[in-house]
């Protein structure tokens, strides 16, 4: 396994860092700032992040020997080799997380429900710790970003129609007043513009009604 060690994470050349979801500071020793880059371990961590599609909160990655002793780590902890990560479960279903971690090649698993994290490493294959309790409410399903949901919402569509029709009606009324003061040859158009203005007002009222209905409906479906 190719590894590179730096006295401080700020010494890591930016051009050599190829894991976009993580930074050297996240992988560095919390006690000394030193970092040991194990490329295979980080490749698998990035694959896990891609597979899950949500952030991984790294509680602990590389540990220098002195920091490992200070926190009571195992004498031969995989953290000192840069092949182990403690990941917070605050934003993950532990069952789904472990399955995904196994799928990308992690072999060692330690569960710490009281501290809220799971240890994963490259092996050998083993497991320890207490199981995470089953939550009373299933883990929330990922929802698309707000801008995507709002883009599909009838609230915006109805509001847009109402706004456009209102502006159009005001514009027609202004034009009608202007034409009423012009030459008599143009005046026959004024009644038609009056009809157009009322049509636009009707569209605006319809848009407002659609907006109100859609807002209530979107709220019920959890889209607002």
Image: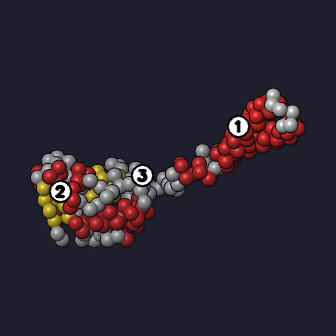
Whether pointer 2 and pointer 1 mark residues with C-beta atoms closer than 8 Å, the reply is: no
User: In front of the other: label 2 or label 3?
Assistant: 2
- What secondary structure is marked by label 2? loop
Quadrant containing the C terminus in the rendered view: top right
User: Between marks 2 and 3, how big is the CA–CA gap?
Assistant: 31 Å
- Say which label, 2 or 3, has the lower sequence index: 2
Q: In this view, does 90 lie to the left or right of 74?
A: right
Taking the spot 14% from the left edge, 47% from the top edge, the residue there is 32
Question: Label 2 belongs to which residue?
Answer: 13
Q: Looking at the image, which residue sits at the far top?
A: 181
Q: Is residue 137 left or right of residue 176?
A: left
Question: Label 3 belongs to which residue?
Answer: 91
User: Between marks 2 and 1, how big is the CA–CA gap?
Assistant: 57 Å
- Say which label, 2 or 1, has the lower sequence index: 2
Q: In this view, does 34 lie to the left or right of 157?
A: left
Crowd around label 3: few <14 · some 14–19 · many ≥20 (10 Å): few
Q: Nearer the viewer, residue 179 or 132?
A: 179
Taking the spot 77% from the left edge, 31% from the top edge, the residue there is 178
- What secondary structure is marked by label 3? loop
Quadrant containing the N terminus in the rendered view: bottom left
Q: Where is residue 151 in the image (x, y as percent from the top left)?
A: 59, 51
- Say which label, 1 or 3, has the lower sequence index: 3
Q: Which of 99 and 4 is in front in this view?
A: 4
Q: Which of 190 and 34 is in front in this view?
A: 190
Taking the spot 34% from the left edge, 66% from the top edge, the residue there is 47
Q: Can residue 136 be seen in this view?
A: no
Q: Position of residue 219 (x, y in %)?
A: 64, 44
Taking the spot 20% from the left edge, 48% from the top edge, the residue there is 30
The image quarter in which residue 74 lies: bottom left
User: Between marks 1 and 3, how big is the CA–CA gap?
Assistant: 46 Å
- What secondary structure is marked by label 1? helix
Question: Label 1 belongs to which residue?
Answer: 167
């Amino acid at each position: 396994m190719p590894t590179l060690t730096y006295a401080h994470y700020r010494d890591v050349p930016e051009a050599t860092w190829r894991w976009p979801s993580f930074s050297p500071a996240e992988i560095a020793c919390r006690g000394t700032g030193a970092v040991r880059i194990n490329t295979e371990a980080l490749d698998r961590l990035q694959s896990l992040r891609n597979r899950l599609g949500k952030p991984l909160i790294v509680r602990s990655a590389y540990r220098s020997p002195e920091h490992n002793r200070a926190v009571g780590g195992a004498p031969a902890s995989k953290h000192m080799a840069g092949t182990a990560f403690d990941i917070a479960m605050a934003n993950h279903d532990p069952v789904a997380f472990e399955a995904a971690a196994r799928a990308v090649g992690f072999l060692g698993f330690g569960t710490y429900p009281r501290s809220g994290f799971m240890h994963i490493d490259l092996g050998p294959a083993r497991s320890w710790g207490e199981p995470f309790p089953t939550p009373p409410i299933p883990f929330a399903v990922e929802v698309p970003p707000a801008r995507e949901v709002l883009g599909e919402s009838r609230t915006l569509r109805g509001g847009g129609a109402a706004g456009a029709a209102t502006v159009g009606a005001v514009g027609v009324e202004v034009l009608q007043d202007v034409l009423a003061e012009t030459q008599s040859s143009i005046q026959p158009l004024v009644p038609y513009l009056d009809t157009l203005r009322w049509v636009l007002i009707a569209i605006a009222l319809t848009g407002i009604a659609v907006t109100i209905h859609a807002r209530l409906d979107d709220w019920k479906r959890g889209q607002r």
